[in-house]
Amino acid sequence: EVQLLESGGGLVQPGGSLRLSCAASGFTFSSYNMAWIRQAPGTGLEWVSGIDSSGPTYYTDSVKGRFTISRDNSQNTLSLQMNTLRVEDTAIYYCAKGRMSRDGLDSWGQGTLVTVSS
Amino acid sequence: QSVLTQPPSVSAAPGQKVTISCSGSSSNIGNNYVSWYQQLPGTAPKLLIYDNNRRPSGIPDRFSGSKSDTSATLGITALQTGDEADYFCGTWDGSLSAGVFGGGTRLTVL
């Protein structure tokens, strides 16, 4: 059974940093693309970043230069380093397995809440 | 303002059929596969349809997907109260080099 478990969320001040992690199990992590999707309170889904199984990374415009996605295939872990956080980054962040271009995001974690506030 | 456009809400009676539209452009839906997600209240999204019209294992055939040019449609037949949820379409946008979602459609089963 595929399991994705996010951690690292919390309360941070504007301009601060946070690192999210996603522990994956139940599948061959190194073979799959992975992604981070967020959902601000009461709003829809926003694709944040993706990383191919082979390494290339992608970002939505609003986080380029501030967020960095990475993966550790030896630890089956996906990470999202978030710097220079803004109030508008406040959201539940979901880790997901798959790709938007094909196959879809077939497994999701339960999410971790990031709150950016002074 | 989402890249993909969905109606904010749809409603129908139990047992009836409903369709949810998702409109995009040649840079996204027109040249990539579309997937659909169901989000029940207070839960993480779940994949309903992938590659325009394919259902993952465990998804009942009451759910169907189609795509034509730069638009996609999710169909749900034999509606149940348990289908009340938010539904999102998604795809890849080649111009943005990013994933994109629709704004979501809330389904109410009256």
Image (tube, grey):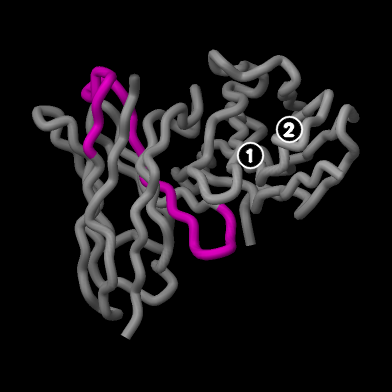
The amino acid on which the numbered mark 2 sits, given as a three-letter code, is: Ala
Against B57, residue B50 (above or below) is: below
**Which tag, 1 or 2, sits closer to the chain's start?**
2
Q: Which residues are magenta?
A: A23-44
Determine which quarter of the picture holds residue A3. Answer: top left
Label pair 1/2, CB-CB below 8 angstroms: yes
Q: Position of residue A17 (x, y in %)?
A: 21, 68
The amino acid on which the numbered mark 1 sits, given as a three-letter code, is: Cys
* Label 1 CA crowd tier, 10 Å (few <14, some 14–19, many 20+): many
Residue found farthest to the bottom: A118
The residue shown at (49%, 34%) is: A100
Viewer-side residue, A43 vs B84:
B84
Against B80, residue B27 (above or below) is: below
Q: Which residue is mark 1?
A: B89
Q: Which residue is mark 2?
A: B72
Q: Position of residue A28 (x, y in %)?
A: 24, 18
The residue shown at (78%, 28%) is: B76
Name the chain under label 1: B
The residue shown at (40%, 68%) is: A90
* Label 2 CA crowd tier, 10 Å (few <14, some 14–19, many 20+): many
Q: Which is more foreground, mark 1 or mark 2?
A: 1
The residue shown at (65%, 53%) is: B103
Viewer-side residue, B101 vs B14:
B14
Cα distance in 3D space between marks 1 and 2: 8 Å
Q: Position of residue A60 (x, y in %)?
A: 42, 54
